[in-house]
Amino acid sequence: MKPFLAVLAALVTTATGYTPFTPPYPPQIIKSSQSRRTFIELASATVFAATLVAPKAASASDDSIIPVYFGAGCFWHVQHEFVEAEIKFLKRSEKQLTARAGYAGGTKLGKDGRVCYHNLGGKDEYGKMGHCEVVGLSIPKSSFADFCRVYFALYDKKGNRPDQLGDRGGEYRSIVGFPGGASNVELTNIVKDVSAEFGGVVKVVEGKAQGGDDDLRGGTYVMNNENFPFHLGELYHQFHDGFAPGENYPASYNNIKNNLNEAGLLDDTACPLM
């Protein structure tokens, strides 16, 4: 992985002017009439090979680039919004994008440390191990508030996430993860301040997340991503269309995963393909 990290660090420096970092670990909006799990099971025969590299994390002491993740129901639409944010706020090129669909918030791991989506064999499924769907990425600390605004903009005026009436349960709970979690007063206050900008309809829950937490309607858990790290999702989940109207994204977006794969920037998750 060293060659990739060196290239990524150089790209980040060139594009943002921030100091390169060395990571310590690899870091379906639904229709009301159809569950996303059923859709995946029916379509399992066409699932792509899972080979994608995770967003890379920075150390908590690095005040330039920090690893974060955001969870708000299905990760398909959420990833698209954060990819757009990376392009808008950070002027990142396709190969510099770090937003990845994945899992976090649990305390258990499967075979060889893997965390996987629902599969026919029921192997190492994320929900069974207390994880939920998130999007992980690495951003400048100074941009954290901007990305929090993207996050809270996902919710409606009642504090409902986009798929609130469809995807339900702990697998789709709302969480925000960053170094230190609730003990990081600076970043926690940013989350709270941005929530207030949106009327405080989504309450910021500090110090209560234990892993495998329940879905909290109108609330988001603050997580320490050093204790609850990000786990990369399968390739077929990356840069995926959502289910809701207007979420048929351009082929150029869907094809990002293939371009990154061909560029040698993707790793295999080793999860079952179906």
Image (tube, rainbow, N blue to C red):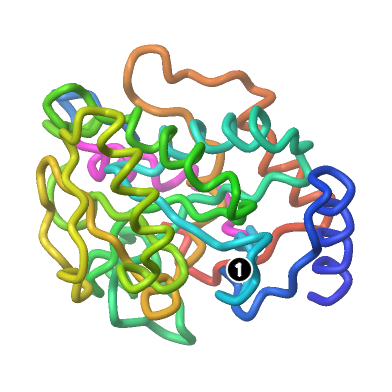
The amino acid on which the numbered mark 1 sits, given as a three-letter code, is Ala
Q: Residue at x 42, y 85 (%)?
A: 111
Residue pictured at 67% horizontal, 74% vertical? 23
Q: Which residues are magenta?
A: 35-51
Q: Secondary structure at mark 1?
A: loop
The answer to whether residue 19 is magenta is: no
Per the image, the residue denoted by label 1 is 57
What residue appears at the point 61 percent right and 56 percent down from the top-left corner? 138
Q: Quadrant of residue 149?
A: top left
Q: Dividing the picture into quarters, in which one does residue 256 lie? A: top right
List x then y, in percent, for residue 201. Answer: 16, 33
| Residue 39 within the segment the image draws in magenta | yes
Examine the rendered structure and indicate whether residue 235 appears above or below residue 154.
below
The number of discs equals 1
Of all residues shown, which one is farthest toward the bottom?
A: 112
**Does residue 121 appear anywhere in the picture?**
no
Residue under the image location 64 percent in, 33 percent down? 89
Regarding residue 115, the answer to whether it shows in the image is: yes
Rendered location of residue 146, percent (x, y): 51, 37
Viewer-proximal residue among 248 and 10: 10
- The quadrant the N terminus occupies is bottom right
Q: Residues within 10 Å of mark 1 (few under 14, many from 20)?
A: many
Which quarter of the figure is the C terminus placed in? bottom left
> Which residue is at the far top?
246
**Residue 160, horizontal then vertical, whole percent:** 16, 32
Q: Judge whether 82 appears above or below 19 on screen.
A: above
Q: Is residue 246 above or below residue 70?
A: above
Residue 20, given in percent of the width and then of the height, sits at 80, 64
Residue placed most toward the observer, 250 or 84 = 84
